[in-house]
Image (cartoon, rainbow, N blue to C red):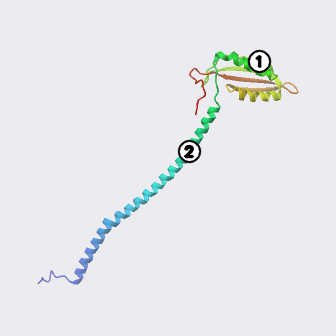
Amino acid sequence: MIPAELRLNATTVHAIGAAVCLTIVGTAVFVGVFPTMRARAAERTAIARLEQVRSDRTRVSEEYAALSESLSKLRAENASRWVDLRGERQLNMRMADLTTMLTDRGFEIQALQAADVEAGPVVARIPIRLEVLGPLTDAIDLLGTLDEDYPDLHCETINIEHTGPESVRLRLNLRWLLAPADMPKEKPTG
């Protein structure tokens, strides 16, 4: 027989059983549920981060495509704007070409003078002062011709003076861009 002080009544047995059950449940929650909840929270965070990365990747891909297209357009535009620059020794040929073009268009040349070579930020250049008399419509056409047919001549100033009913004096200060020594002789591809 069990002594009376060691005997357990039903309430004590139930209390011990409940304590053991609570310990098992608490351990199960601590070992199983909390880590699972933390893992799910971490998974949700990882999924949100993954979605953000996918969104960023899509945005970057779109930006890359747009930039690639812009770069292709710029390359094509630059290739179409290629200007063959000539050396200083060809100044007389350039001046003769300008004289021929101006007289063929009916302009009276008042001045066509080149100055000394001056250093520029990218290439050297020769200042050219041009002064002609002619009809206003021809003067406007001349500006377009200089822009299209003489891309190595940059116009710094234009002065148009009315001299008669249909006549104007056109004064231009031009800069003839010279080829640097290391400039490629052919239009780049691409």
Mark 1 vs mark 2, CA separation in Å: 52 Å
Which residue occupies the foreground of this view, 181 or 34? 181
Judged from the image, the secondary structure of the residue bearing numbered disc 1 is strand
Q: Is residue 94 left or right of residue 71?
A: right
Look at 27% across and 71% down and name the residue there.
24
Q: Residue 162's image quarter?
A: top right
Q: Which residue is mark 1?
A: 111
Is 99 situated above or below 37?
above
Q: Position of residue 94 (x, y in %)?
A: 70, 19
Q: Position of residue 155 (x, y in %)?
A: 71, 26
Amino acid under label 1? Answer: Ala
Look at 64% across and 17% down and name the residue there.
88
Amino acid under label 2? Answer: Ala
Q: Is residue 50 left or right of residue 130?
A: left
Quadrant for the C terminus, please.
top right
Is 74 situated above or below 127?
below
Judged from the image, the secondary structure of the residue bearing numbered disc 2 is helix
Of label 1 and label 2, which has the lower sequence position? 2
Q: Residue 154's image quarter?
A: top right
Look at 45% across and 54% down and name the residue there.
50
Q: Position of residue 148 (x, y in %)?
A: 71, 29
Q: Residue 170's image quarter?
A: top right
Q: In the rendered structure, find residue 93 and report the number of the disc placed on it.
A: none
Look at 51% across and 53% down and name the residue there.
55
Quadrant for the N terminus, please.
bottom left
Q: Position of residue 109 (x, y in %)?
A: 79, 19
Q: Is residue 63 left or right of residue 173?
A: left
Q: In the rendered structure, find residue 65 and report the number of the disc placed on it.
A: 2
